[in-house]
Image (tube, rainbow, N blue to C red):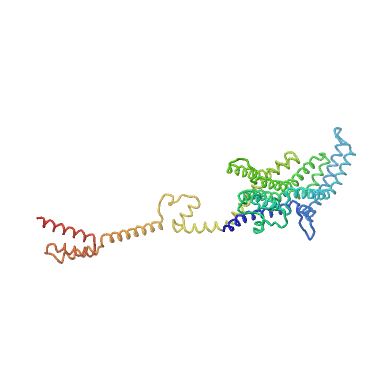
Amino acid sequence: MFNWFWNFLYGISKSMYRIIDFLMSCANMLCGIEPMRYQGVETDFLSFLLSNRNISYGFVAAVLIAVVLTILFGVAALIRAIVSEKSNMTPAQVLVKVGKTLLTFLFIPICLSALVYFTNVLMQALYSATLGGSPDGIGRFLAGAFGQDALKSGVPEDFYLSESFNYMSTGNVRGYLDLTDYDYFFSWIGSICILLSMGVTLLAFIDRAISIVVLFIFSPISLATSVVDDGAHFKLWRDQFFVKFLTAYGCIIAINIYALVIGAISSTGLVFFENSLLNNFMKILIIVGGSVSMQRIMALIGNLISAGAGSNELRDTAIAGAAMRGALGGAARVFTAPFRATRSAANFVRDSRQFGTLSTIGQRLGFRTKRDYGVMSNAQMAQSKDLMREREKLRRQSNASFFGGKSSVQKVLEGAKNDKGKEGAGGNAGKNIAKKDNPIVNNAINNSLNKDKDDKNKK
């Protein structure tokens, strides 16, 4: 009877799993874990950018500039080696260093391509190892992890690894799980935390891809300074490149590990406290705390590469996120500008009709007008008079309905005039009219007559 309700709840969970798989696919493609196709050839995103023709032109221009700088720096170092007695290098050593620097320019693209290729191979293996055995994404693992307490008899715990299992088909899932016992609450909390982390990470990936391209183009210029500073600037470039390059992979691996932790925490076999409410609160605290720490994983990996580099990267990411939110807010204001202008114009026309054009213009410019001192405009005075007339009309109608109307009084006076000279004639006429027109007066007259008769009988 309530199957539709459980299908609806699982529909929410599986939609979240599907979105997570979509975001992970985008992130994996940006990182190079999943290949992309360009003109029918499989490649990874970074290799595609670094081998792009226009970017290659920029690199060649940077190499030409670096060659000129290397020669200039080499001449300066050679002069210093000849003139200065405190120089650490002989002229021969300077010439050897200049030659090595010029040759290194040729190997930069080759070295970067080899680095990207081997790193992708290693990260693909590590990524697959942290999927919890799932062959096609983290969504399948999450669907199985939160359904461990809903297993039907005879279904193995690793049922989600079966090729026939499809978490997007509710009917297929019912063959493995009893949806009335599915951990919907924890699945929603864990999925939302992963989605938020993935959203922030995806934005950071775009920034890293652009940063790597910039570092690639400027690498010859940084290398050219090795002649005079013993490679200090090139070492700085190398640290920046590795931090940008490896932290992206680290975020993806960290998300997979986080999903494994969520799957382990959500099991009912894990008991922190005997109180079920307190026990669930503890599990939620771990899940939410883990999602917050996801942003610090980048700093952790960066600091392993170079001291302080990861913390600087995290700070730059926070600044970029604030700038992105500001840009989105500005775009929203630009998009709603026509609607706000239309609303302002309509309000100006209405205020002009109500308070006058000059008063409205002064109010818009920030000046005090008669409106601020309680002085009514012509339109307001006319509205006030109309309101007073309406109130007077309603008052007269109310009086007429209560006292019988003016016409009844006129009839009483006319009856008294026609029966002049006859005592009580006016009263009788008034009584007759009152009986006809006003039941309250009629009852009062009858009670008075009955009382007079009673007094006479007593006498």
Residue 395 in percent (x, y) is at 31, 58
Quadrant location of residue 445?
A: bottom left
Judge by depth and name the residue closer to the eye, 299 or 95. 299
In the picture, measured across the screen, residue 79 lies left or right of residue 394, that is right
Assign the C terminus to one quadrant of the image: bottom left
In the picture, measured across the screen, residue 439 lies left or right of residue 167, that is left
Q: Which residue is farthest left?
A: 459
Assign the N terminus to one quadrant of the image: bottom right
Q: Which residue is farthest bottom?
A: 418
Residue 216 in percent (x, y) is at 78, 49
Identify the residue at horizontal 89%, vertical 39% (top origin): 93
Judge by depth and name the residue closer to the eye, 418 or 344. 418
Residue 172 in percent (x, y) is at 67, 58
Judge by depth and name the residue closer to the eye, 179 or 427. 179
Identify the residue at horizontal 50%, vertical 53% (top origin): 364
Residue 436 in percent (x, y) is at 22, 65
